Amino acid sequence: MNILCSEPAADGFRMPAEFAAHEGCILIWPHRRDSWQNGAYAARKAFAELIGWISKSEKVTVCARFEDYDEARRLLPPQVRVVEMSSDDSWARDVAPTFVTNGSTIRGIDWGFNAWGGLVDGLYFPWDKDNKMARKLCDLLDKDCYNYRDFILEGGSIHTDGEGTLLTTEECLLGKGRNPHLNKIEIEQKLCAALGVEKIIWLRKGIYHDETNGHIDNICAFTAPGEVVLAWTDDENDPQYAISSECLDILTHSSDAKGRPIRVHKLLLPKPVCITEQECEGLDDMDGEPTRTAGERLAASYVNFYIANHHVIVPQFGDDNDAKALETLQPLFPTRTVIGIYARDILIGGGNIHCITQQIPLAI
Amino acid sequence: MNILCSEPAADGFRMPAEFAAHEGCILIWPHRRDSWQNGAYAARKAFAELIGWISKSEKVTVCARFEDYDEARRLLPPQVRVVEMSSDDSWARDVAPTFVTNGSTIRGIDWGFNAWGGLVDGLYFPWDKDNKMARKLCDLLDKDCYNYRDFILEGGSIHTDGEGTLLTTEECLLGKGRNPHLNKIEIEQKLCAALGVEKIIWLRKGIYHDETNGHIDNICAFTAPGEVVLAWTDDENDPQYAISSECLDILTHSSDAKGRPIRVHKLLLPKPVCITEQECEGLDDMDGEPTRTAGERLAASYVNFYIANHHVIVPQFGDDNDAKALETLQPLFPTRTVIGIYARDILIGGGNIHCITQQIPLAI
């Protein structure tokens, strides 16, 4: 692995869309007792079900801590590769590399990671194991690695159409916990140079009460060039209503890098999903304080799906809108089968299916 | 990775000779402060020099502990892959899988490992991290893995010609620290079933004062089918003289699996190499006892070379016989260049170049 200090766009590299073909997918086996209830047993079952689906059409690599390797190996199918790698938590989207391609080669970008806000409003301390993973994953996969450790970014805060357009949120990228020394124009320049995009569409905020500071990947995602799904509620009393309405307004008044208008498909949210007292009792404290409070609203959203080569895998919450989400998404992915998996046990950790995956694109 | 409980030979698999073509090579970055003097700095330089040579013609994977990854990455060339993997020490020959092939597929064998003798006369405790490495390396390399954990064996205790013959020593394989519940015939059956060999040539003992209980790879090695090099001294007062003479006697009265006589090339040993007081001062104690004593003879031998695709890399000790060893070996490897590297800093750890490498054969 070469560590590169040049800029991907200048080298002819760009980030492909998630709906482009994948070589594989990376996940991290869950273990934190203050993130995953009851020793992560239920979360591991949900991870394993998800991995089973992804591994039908992609080579999956799962990173497990030394002490978790045997159990991960036991619970995952043989076509999945399990490798030892230390981590602080299990959010591959945010700590694995963002991969870029020039059409024949794949390289990774090693962003700085500070647990979603560092000492300002980060979610745990320390985060050094997570921050080392992107480079080590490039090494493992034999791909050269761009050194962007001086720029804090999580993969969950960006979505691209692969044709020059990037979607993100101001709440996250302009927050004090990321790169407060850079202004919006400087951040745009950084993103364009790193990801090979020319146009950035800025939504204001992400999902209500999302502890990632409003990651884009929980509220809005490209399903094709010029088309997005947007998390939506018709309940005007829900604080989410104003957020989603503002997003809709921005999107319908935006065009993409190719000059196309953005077609928005509303993806109805489940009713508010709140953590129970029993679930909270299954979580360790962090530094003497509970990480969740009974009744706390979790950032449940169907937008947090993963687009595998043959399937789109969508979180389900036991809500009336579960089936509707699958019905909305299926026609948007005509070459893939849309699959729902029950994901409450992933949601309790603070994110969902998209957050725990990171695709490795095929070099085409 | 599938974990297989069948027998490789019955599945049509056999262990190729080291001089057959390699896909790659595995090493483990040194770290134990009671094995490698002065925090392993000098050993790491020697490892890096060796890895530089091997990586000219083979894909090298180096396993480093979490805390050592950055330094290993810094000191190794970019074409080498560094992966995180926990280990107790750094002897890839003995803890990495032994690979077998059926001509089109490579599989690994996961032998039991007990630190060269377990609670009888093992060299450290615990050894659980080492014992888990073979399976994890198969997983990393996407190769199916034979489960032989109930049979204690180190890769350094066997050499094959790839044509049905195995070389080993009674001192090691019949010792009380390995598989005392099995007799010699049962051990032969196990080796034949696992390695696809039909004929086992048993030498009595390995190099004098070799703490591995006389591993074959320090005293005798195949250079071609029907040809071996044997560590030799002409000094009749050296305790090694009787050992090597007995080996010579056995070898010259043996034939291989194909019925060929064994041609023996004597490889003159260096003068006895002993650890100095200053070197001992750079080693941590183990459980309150020193691991080496000043003046202690180390098991120096030129036989502990590694046969890479394009080079044969041979330990050197600053001895008059260093150059002679290279001269003896070069005509035995007409398609490879014989290279010497100064290896005293590896020897202090307890083994040498062959002990710290494990080849992955090409599937041909």
Image (cartoon, coloured by chain):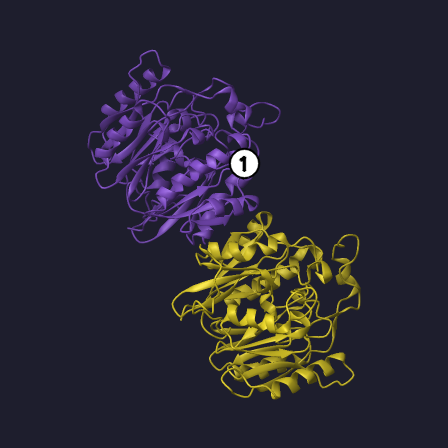
Chain colours: A yellow, B purple
Query: Is A352 or A185 nearer to us in this picture?
Result: A185
Residue A206 percent across, percent down from the top left: 67, 75
Residue B271 lies in what quarter of the image? top left
Q: Does residue A315 appear in the picture of this structure? A: no
Q: Left of B157 or right of it: where is A52?
A: right
Q: Which residue is drawn at 61% across and 88% down?
A: A252
Total tally of numbered discs in the picture: 1
| Residue B233 visible in the current orientation | yes
A236 to A98, vertically: above or below: below
Residue B148 rendering spot, x and y as whole percentages:
45, 41
Pick whichever, B21 or B153, lies toward us: B21
Q: Is mark 1 on a helix, strand or loop?
A: loop
Residue at screen point 73% across, 83% down: A242
Could you say where residue A241 lies in the image, as x and y percent from the top left? Answer: 73, 83
Identify the image quadrant of residue A133. bottom right
Q: Quadrant of the C terminus of chain A?
A: bottom left
Residue furthest to the top = B237
Q: Residues within 10 Å of mark 1 (few under 14, many from 20)?
A: some
Q: Is residue A268 above or below residue B16?
A: below
Q: Is residue B168 shown left or right of residue A324?
A: left
Q: Which amino acid does label 1 sit on?
A: Trp
Determine the chain carrying the residue at label 1: B
Where does the image place residue B225, in percent across and percent down from the top left?
A: 23, 36
In this picture, residue A314 sits left or right of residue B193: right
The quadrant of the image that shows the N terminus of chain A is bottom left
Can you identify the residue that label 1 sits on?
B127
Please, is residue B216 above or below residue A287 in the view? above
